Amino acid sequence: MVIREYQPKKALNSDFSNKYLNKNIQEIPTMNRQKILITGMSGLIGGIVGRHLDSLGYEIRALNRSQVEGFDTVKADITDPDAIGPAFEGIDTVIHLAAYLGDDELAQIDINITGTYNIFEAAKNAGVKRVIFGSSGATMMAAERHEPFKTMVEGRIEDISDPRPMMNHLTPPHPDRMYGVAKIAGEAMARLFAEHHGSAIVARIGRVRKEDQPANIREASVHFSHRDVAQFFEKCVKAPDNIKWDVFYGVSDNFTRFRDIDHPKKMIGYTPQDGIRHWPAK
C-alpha cells in the first residue's frame, strides 16, 4: 500500500539549519524547478541533504517509511517495488540514501541489494535522468587494516612520507563485511543504469555524526561535516550532463585523510570547507 502525505514546512531549530542553510531561498520558476526524490530522508544525511536542496529552491519529495515533516512524502518500503513506483513520477534526479546498517546479512541482501535494485528499476521506468547512489567507504574498509592506510587510520603521520597514499575512484574495492559488499553491488547497478538509461554518480560517503565531530582517531580521517555533506550533494545534483558515470569520495579535508577529494573537485567543483586538523578534535 502506498501512502502519500504532505505537511506544511515548519521552521527548523537544528544547529545545521541555523549555521549552514541558505535562508534566502532562490526562487526558481515553477516550470524550471528540478524535482528531486530523496530516499531515507528521515535519516541524518538525508535530512541534511533534503533541507539544503529545498533551501536552494529545488522541489523535494521524500520516499520514506515514515512521514518526513514539511515535505511531500511517499510512505513506502524500498523492498516493495509496486509501492515505491508513484514516488518517481515527474522526478528528474534521485538521491538514494535509504539503507540498512545492521549486521543481519540476509537483511543486507533484502534491503541494500534488492531494495537498491528496485530503486534503479523504478528510476528507469520513470525516465529519471540521474541517480546519485549513496555508497560508503565500507566498500574499502578492509584496506584500512593494511599498509599504507593502516598508519593513516592510526594517526601516525610522522611515519608517512610524501606523497601520502590515497584511495581514489580507481582503487579496487576491498570490503570487510556484508554491508560493504551490498554497497559494491549497488555501485554496479549504478554503472548498469548509466550504461543504458541515464547518468549515475556514486557517492562514497564518509563518517557523518549528529554531533558534527568524529568520535575517535579513525573517524578523524574520514570525518564528513554537515556543511560539506550539503555542498557535496549539491555539486552532485549540479554535475555537468556529460558526467554519465563517476565515483566520488565524500569526506572533509581532514589532516589524516586517505580518501581522495581531488577527483570530485576536478569533476564537480567540490571544495570542502571543513576538516579535522588535530586529534582530539579542537
Image (cartoon, rainbow, N blue to C red):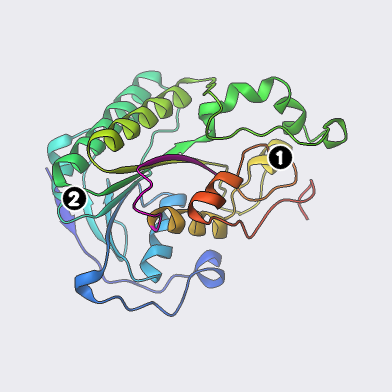
- Quarter of the image for residue 65 reads top left
- Quarter of the image for residue 10 reads bottom left
Residue 75 in sight from this viewpoint: yes
Q: Is residue 202 left or right of residue 89?
A: right
Q: Nearer the viewer, residue 164 or 19?
A: 164
- Quarter of the image for residue 206 reads top right
Q: Amino acid at mark 2?
A: Ala
Q: Which numbered tag is attached to residue 216? A: 1
Q: Nearer the viewer, residue 258 or 244?
A: 244
**Looking at the image, which residue is at 40% across and 70% down?**
55
Residue 243 lies in magenta, yes or no? yes
* Residue 244 image position (x, y, % from top left): 35, 43
Q: Residues within 10 Å of mark 2 (few under 14, many from 20)?
A: many
Q: Is residue 73 above or below residue 130?
A: below
Q: Amino acid at mark 1?
A: Asn
Q: Is residue 51 above or below residue 250?
A: below
**Looking at the image, which residue is at 59% across and 57% down?**
271
- Mark 2, secondary structure of its residue: helix
**Looking at the image, which residue is at 39% across and 63% down?**
53
Q: Which numbered tag is attached to residue 87? A: 2
Residue 42 lies in magenta, yes or no? no
Whole-Å distance between the Cαs marked 2 and 1? 38 Å
* Residue 168 image position (x, y, % from top left): 58, 35
- Mark 1, secondary structure of its residue: loop
Question: Which portion, as a residue range, is magenta?
Answer: 238-249
Comes first in the chain, label 2 or label 1: 2
